[in-house]
Image (tube, helix red, strand yellow):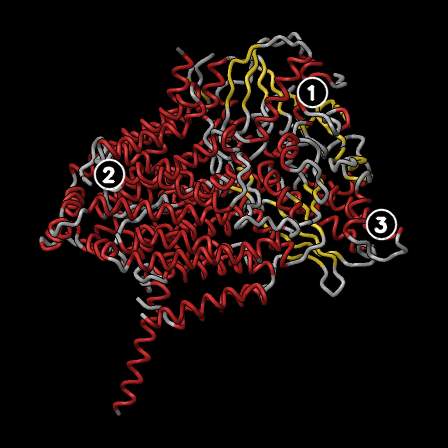
Amino acid sequence: MPTTRRTVLKAMAGVGLAAATRPLASYGASGGQTLKIGILAPRSGVAGTVGECGLRAALWAKDRANASGGILGRPVELVVEEETNPKDTIQRLNKLVLQDKVDCVQGIVSSGVSLAMGPAAEDMKALTLFWDGTTQDGTEESMPHARYVFKSTDNECEAVMASLLAIKYWRGKFATVAGVNPDYTYGRNNWAAFQALLKRFGVEHKVVAELWPKVGGLDLSSHVAALKAAKPDLVFSSMLFADLPIFMKQAHAAGLFETTKFAFPAAGWQHTALKNDFTPEGMIFGHNTLYFAYPNASPLQKEFVKHYWDAYKDYPNWEAERAFFAFAAYKSAVEKAGKAKGGAFPDKEAIIDTLEGIEVESLGGKARFRKDHVADQIFYQGFTVHDPRYDFAILGNVEVRSAEKLQKPSGVTFKDWIANGKIEI
Amino acid sequence: MTSFLDILLGGVFHAAVLFLVAAGLQLVFGVQKIINLACGSFYALGAYTGISAVTWALAHGLPRGLFLFALIGAGLGLAVIGPPVEALLRTVYRRDEAFQLLLTFALVLIIEDILRMIWGANPQELGNLYMDYGTVGKGALTVPTYNLLVIAAALLVAIGLGLFLKRTRFGRLLRATAEDRETSATLGIEVGRVYTVVFTLGTVLGTLGGALVVPTAAASLDMSVDLVVEAFAVVVIGGLGSIRGAVVGALTVGLMRAFAVSFVPEMEMLSIYLVVIAVLIFRPAGLFGKAAA
Amino acid sequence: MKLAAVVGLAALAALAAAPLVLEPYPLTLLLQFFAYGLALLGLNLLFGYTGLLSFGQALFVALGAYSAAVCTRKLGWHSFELVLGVAVVTAVVVAVPVGLLCVRYVSIFFGMLTLAFGMLFHSFLFKFYTVTGGDGGMLVERPSLLGMRFSEMDKTTFLTRPFYWYALGLLAVGTVVMWRLVHSPFGVHLSAIRENPRKAEYLGVEVRRLRLIAFVIAGVYAAVGGTLLGIRTGLADPELAYWTHSGNLIFMTVLGGFSSFAGPLVGAAVFIFLQDSLMSVTQYWRLVMGMVLVVIVVLFPRGLVGLAQALRARVIGWRRDARAD
C-alpha cells in the first residue's frame, strides 16, 4: 500500500514538535541567568517515597539558596525527571543534558541505575552528583577515573557498620545466620560484606538460609516460611524498599522475632512504616547519613526536620541528607571557584577541581568529597526501642561512625580492604 | 515437618489469591473469548480501594475487628466498573483478537495512571491491622488467622462458582453462551446481558482478590503488571476457560513458588515459565481446558 | 508504486539532512526511531502479513542489545559489522527453535507462548547476574563503523553524526529488503496464510515452514534494532525483554496501521515523539498514551496510515463530486 504525503508530513511534524518542546516539570525562578539543576529521582513504585523525600530536601535546599540570593547571584531552578530503569533513565539524562542544558545533574537512588548511568554521564561530560547507589566494585570496572561523576559513599558502608556492631555486641551469642537481601546488586554487595567481615574477625557461624526476595515483590510469605524453617539465630537483611515493612509484618505474624536477632543496615529508608506493633526492640537498625531524632543533631538538621514535619507531617529518611549534600556541595564549589575567579561564574572544570576535597555542613554533619570523587559522610545506626512519642521504632543508643572507617580508601579493592585493611570494631 | 507445613500454607495462601484473579480471567475467557490483560489492574484497584474503604470505615466508627467486611464491601462495590469496561470491549468483539488484547493493554496503562492520580505514586498499606485476628497454632507452627480466612474465602468462591455454573439457570445460560454464541442468541438468550454479567463477575473476582490480600502486604503501582504474568501461568496450566483448572493452576503456581523460594531460589520465576512453556507445547489445552490450538 | 518510491526518497533525504538542522536531543530520539522502525518492520511481517501476534518480540530486541554488549565489552570486538553479524546469527539461533515450538499454534496460544518465552529470557537476564550483569545490565561500548573509530569525537557527536547516518542507512536497506519480501511470492503466500490457513495449505503452501521463516526474519530485524538501541543508550538491560515492552511494540504497529507497509514506521515515529513530549509535560503520560491506543483500536483500527488513506479517498471523492457538478 503506498504511503501518502500526509504520513510523511506527520512524521516531520513530530520532529518539529520535539524540537519545540520545553519541560514543564521545573521548579523555581525563571529568568535569563537561571542556574538549572537537573534532578533524577524515582517518583513511583517501591522507591517512590525515597525519591520523594530526596526531592523535598532538594527543594528546601534550593529555596533556602534562592532566599539568600541564589548561587553566585543566579537564581536556581530544579528540572525534575523520573528515575525508572537504567535504559529509560539514561534517556531522561540525555534530555536533561542535551535539551534542557542543565548545569548539573543530581539524583539517582538505585545501584543498578547508577552503574549504568555513570559511564553515560562521563561520556556526555555532564557534571553529575549521585545521591545514592554506586557500588564500588562495579564502578571500578566501568568508571576507573571518573572526572564528571561524583559518587555517594560506597554501598557497603551501612553493611560494614551493621556487621561491626553485630560483632561487637553479639559475638558469641549467635551460631547460625540467615540472609534476606533484595535480589540485585545492592543486596548482594551487602550480604557479601557481612560474610566477609564475620570471616575476617573469626566469628564462627553457619549460614542456614540465603534468601533473595525480588525487589518490590509484595508477597514475602514464602520467604518468611523458609526463614522460619531455617531457625537462624541472626538474620541479616539489607532490604530497604517498600517491601521491608511487609516483610516485618509477615515475619512478626509468623512468630519469627521471638528468639532471633536482627541486623538491618538500611531499614532507615522505611523507618516511619516500621510500626511498633511489628518491629521488635533491640534490632540493629541503620539510618545511614541522617537519623531524624538524633539527640545531638546540628541546628541545621533540627531546622530541616521541623520544616519537614510542618510541611509534610512526616519525618525524613536519609535520602534527604544525600540530596541536601549534593546541592550544598555543588553550591559551595561554585561559590568557592567563583570567588577565586573574582566573582565570575566558574566553568565546569573549575567547579570539578573545587569539588574534589570540598567539605560542607550537611544535614547529618560535616560531609566531604574525596579526591577520587567518593563521598565521605557520617553514619548513624543503633538498637531499636519503642518510644511512646512515635508509632514507629526509633533508636535507643546511637552509634556514630565516619565513612572513613567504613569504606575502602582509594586505590584498594574491597576484597583486599576487608581482608587486610585497618578496620576497628 | 512444621517447616514443610509453613511453606505449604504460604504457598496455599498465595494460591488462594491467585485463584480469585485467575477465576475471573477464566470466566471472561470462557464466555467471551477475551483475554483480559488488565486483570492485574483490577487486582490493584481492589487493593487500593480496600485500603481506603477500611481507613474510612474505621474512622467512622467501624469496630476494628470488622475490617474484613469493609474489604469485602470494597471488592464487591467495584462491580460498578464492570459494565462500562465491558461496553468498551464490546466495540471490538467481532474484530481480530489482537485488538481485544490491545484494548485491554490500553486499560492497563490507563488504570495505572488513574491509581496514581487518586492514591499517589507511593505504596499504601494497612499497618498491622490483620493481626487483630490473632494467630492459630503455637510455637513453631503459627499462622495468622487472617490468612486462613482468605484461604477459606477462596475455597467458598470456588465451590460457589462451581455450583453457580452447574446448578443455577443463569449458570446454564452462561455455559450455553460459551459453547455457541450464535445458537444461544437464536434460542432467545440475551447474549449482551450475559456478557455484561460475566465480565462484571470476572472483574469483581479480581478486585476482591486485591482487597483481600492487601492487609498482609501492600498496594503498589507495580502490582498490576507483575500479577498478569502469574495469572496467565495459572490459566495456561489449568486450561483456558476452566474454573477447576484455575484451582489446580493456582495451587501449582503458588506451591511451586513457595518451594522454589526455600530450596532453589534462582529458579523461582524461571520454573513457572518453564512449566508454562512445557504445558503449551505438550498439552496446550492445559490440564482441564477445552479450547484446542 | 512510484508514489511510494518518491515519498520514501523524500523522507530519506529529510532524515539525512536532519543532523544539520536539529539539536542533538531530537536526533537521539530519531535514533530510537531507526531502531524501533527496524524492529517493527519485522514485527509487522509477522503480525500484519502473516497474522501472528507475538507478545515476545522484545526478546529479540534484548538479544540484539546484549549481543552488542557481549561483543564490545566482554570480547573486545568493536567492529559494528561484526556486532551486527553476531546479533543476526544469535537471533536466528534462538528464533529457529522458539519459532518451531510457537508456530504450531495461532492467535492466543501463539501470543501466550511468545509472552512466556519473552519473560523466560527476562528472568534469565535478571537472575543469572554473574553472566548477564543482572538488574544493572551490561555496558555497550562504542563500536567502530566500517573500520573507523572516530575516537576524537565525544559520544554525543558520534551518535548524532556518523552513527546516525549509519543507522539511517541500515533502516533504508532494511525497508527496501522488507518491501521486496512482502511483494514477492513469499509475501503473497504469507497473506494467504493469514486469510485462510486451511485453504492455503490445500493450495500447496507449506504453512508452518513459511510461518517459521517469517518468525525468524522478524527476530533478526528486532535484533538489529536492538543493537542500535544498545549502542545509543550504551547499555543492555533486562527491562528490554519485559512483556510490556513487547506490548509497546504492538502498540506502535497498530498506531501506525498494521495493514500497511509504512504503518509501523509512522507508528514508531509518532509513538516515540509523542511519549517523549508527554513525559516532559505531565506525570500521567501513560493515561494519555492509553487513551490514544483506545481511540486507535476502537475508531481507527487501520491506524494513522489508514486514517490518512481514508481522508485522502474522501478528498478525492469530494473533488470528483465537485468536478461532476
The location of residue A80, given as percent across then percent down, is 63, 52
Q: Residues within 10 Å of mark 1 (few under 14, many from 20)?
A: few
Give the residue pinned by disc 2. B240
Task: Please tell me whether residue A380 is drawn above or below residue B139 in the rendered image.
Answer: below
Do circles 3 and 1 both sit on a common chain? yes
Mark number for residue A9?
A: none
Along the polypeptide, which appears first: circle 3 or circle 1? Answer: 3
Give the residue pinned by disc 3. A337
Disc 3: host chain: A
In the image, what residue occupies the spot 68% across and 49% down? A126
CA distance for labels 3 and 1: 36 Å
CA distance for labels 2 and 1: 56 Å
Horizontally, residue A108 falls left or right of residue C282, namely right
The location of residue C37, given as percent across then percent down, is 42, 56
Which quadrant of the view contains residue A262?
Answer: top right
Q: Amino acid at mark 1?
A: Asp
Do circles 2 and 1 both sit on a common chain? no
Which quadrant of the view contains residue B9?
Answer: top left
Determine the residue located farthest toward the front in the rendered image.
C147
Horizontally, residue C55 falls left or right of residue A171, namely left
Give the residue pinned by disc 1. A416
- Of helix, strand and loop, which one carries label 1? helix
Q: Say which quadrant the C terminus of chain A sits in.
A: top right
- Of helix, strand and loop, which one carries label 2? loop
Task: Please tell me whether residue A424 is drawn above or below residue B291 in the rendered image.
Answer: above
Is C123 or C189 nearer to us in this picture?
A: C189
Q: Amino acid at mark 2?
A: Leu
